[in-house]
Image (cartoon, rainbow, N blue to C red):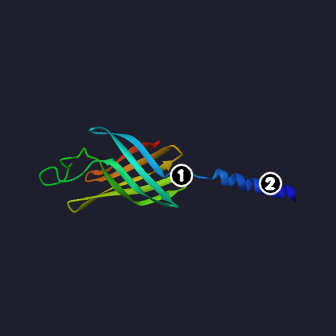
Amino acid sequence: MPKNLLLATTILLAAAFGSKAADITGKWVADVAGRNGTTQMTFELKADGKKLTGTVSGLPNFGGGRRGGGGLSADASAPTDRQISDGKADGNKVSFSVKIERGGQTMVTTYKGTFTDDELKLKQTRQLPNGDQTTDILATRAST
C-alpha cells in the first residue's frame, strides 16, 4: 500500500511541475519588417488568471494625412501606446486585439500565438480594405 501511495504522489508532483506554464507578464520587444523599413514594437503585457491586459507600442499613427482622410497622419513615425482588448492567456497560448478609431472607422488588428519563458511568437492580422494582411512576429522578453 505505501508503494502505491508513493507512486501516486510522485505522479501528481511531476504533473504539477510539468504543467506549470510560463508567465507572459512583462515587456516583450520585436523588430518587425515593413514597407518603410524595420519598426520596433513593444508589448507590455499582464496576465491575471486567463485575463490579459496591456499595451502595444510601435504601431503607426493612422489618421487623415491625405486629402479625404485615410492613410498615415503627418506624424506617422511617432509610435503611440495602444491598449489591448479581448486579451486571453491560456497555458502557453495568447490572443488579443488592438482597435484604432479614426474618422468614424475602426481598424482592428488581432494577435494570436504562443509563448515560452523568453519567446513570444505572434501572428498579427490587420483588417484592410483590400483584405486581411498577416505578419509573423517574434518577440523576446526584455531584460528591463
Mark 1 crowdedness (10 Å alpha carbons): few <14, some 14-19, many ≥20: some
The location of residue 89, given as percent across then percent down, is 50, 57
Residue 2 falls left or right of residue 32: right
Q: Amino acid at mark 1?
A: Asp
Residue occupied by mark 1: 23
Judge whether residue 48 can be spotted in this image.
Answer: yes
In the rendered image, which quarter contains the N terminus?
Answer: bottom right
Residue at left 11%, top 51%? 67
Q: Is residue 108 above or below residue 136?
A: below
**Alpha carbon distance from label 1 to label 2:** 29 Å
Closest to the observer, 89 or 127:
89
> Depth check: 69 or 40 in front?
40
Q: Disc number at residue 15? A: none
Q: Which residue is mark 2?
A: 7
Q: Residue 36 placed where, x, y %?
A: 26, 38
**Residue type beneath disc 2:** Leu
Q: Nearer the viewer, mark 1 or mark 2?
A: 1
Say which quadrant the C terminus sits in. top left
Q: Residues within 10 Å of mark 2 (few under 14, many from 20)?
A: few
Question: SS for tag 2?
Answer: helix
| Residue at (23% x, 46% y) in the render | 76
Q: Earlier in the sequence, mark 1 or mark 2?
A: 2
